[in-house]
Image: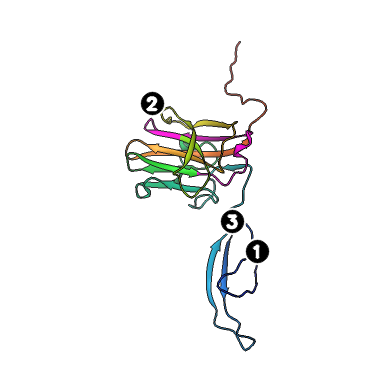
Amino acid sequence: GIYSDTGSGSSFTFTNLEPNTTYYFYINKSCNGIGESSTLGPYTFTTTCEAVTAFSESFEGTDNNLPDCFSFFASDVNNISLSFSTTASNISSGARSLSALSYLNGNALYIVSPLLPNIGANSHRLVFYAKGTTATKLDVGVSATNANTTNVNYIYSTEAANGLTSNMKKYVVNFDQSYSGSFIVIRITYNSTFISSYIDDIVWEAIPLCADVTSVQTTG
């Protein structure tokens, strides 16, 4: 659609725009009824994502774009590569997962969720699948911002001696306390060179009233 409006001065505020949408705009000047200036543009801006109370991200699709409304950081962005894996053993479900290859010992990848207003509601959990090596350690934390990773309250960690496993493993982190923050941060630390990790099916959902079934045993 086309949005048209007029204003004066050096700034202008648009209203009633859609969230997470890129807009293109042009500018010209009306000269007191005697004509208009030449048109400048197009210029672009993208509106921010709106808050969500639940999400499910499985990294499906056919393009190479990272999912909207998530943020991705690294300790050393020049020594990590993000892509999508289509290898069956690296996937929890669907056709692909998010793959990261770190070239640097001590590097870390940070995956930051969309804005979540119900982190402190004591009612939700984070579920995801991950795979790596014993040299990859995973932490889950809460942050007040998605702009940086300097002040994260980490509430869950894999055991340092074990790290991630060589098979896709399900992780469940219950947010059953009043944690303060608006974004969830998943940090993967690479304690060796040239190692990969994979993550898939990240879900933010209500904690079920009935506990998950974790194993089945038959007799007879």
Q: Please give the range of residues in magenta.
A: 112-138
Amino acid identity at mark 3: Asn
**Residue 175 located within the stretch drawn in magenta:** no
Q: Is residue 87 left or right of residue 76?
A: right
Q: Which residue matches tag 3?
A: 20
- Tag shown at residue 161: 2
Q: Which residue matches tag 1?
A: 15
Residue 82 percent location from the top left of the image: 42, 47
Amino acid identity at mark 2: Ala
Residue 106 percent location from the top left of the image: 34, 39
Nearer the N terminus, badge 3 or badge 2? 3
Q: CA distance from mark 3 to mark 1?
A: 14 Å
Give above or below for 67 relative to 94.
below
Disc 3, SS: loop
Amino acid identity at mark 1: Thr
Q: Is residue 113 left or right of residue 16?
A: left
Q: Is residue 2 left or right of residue 192?
A: right
The answer to whether the residues at label 3 and label 2 have Cβ atoms under 8 Å apart is: no
Q: Residues within 10 Å of mark 1 (few under 14, many from 20)?
A: few
Which one is in front in this view, the residue at disc 2 or the one at disc 1? 1
Which residue is depicted at the point 59% across and 42% down? 56
- Quarter of the image that includes the N terminus: bottom right
Nearer the N terminus, badge 3 or badge 1? 1
Disc 1, SS: loop
Disc 2, SS: loop
**In-front residue for pair 204/170:** 204
Based on the displayed image, in which of its 4 quarters is residue 175 positioned? top right
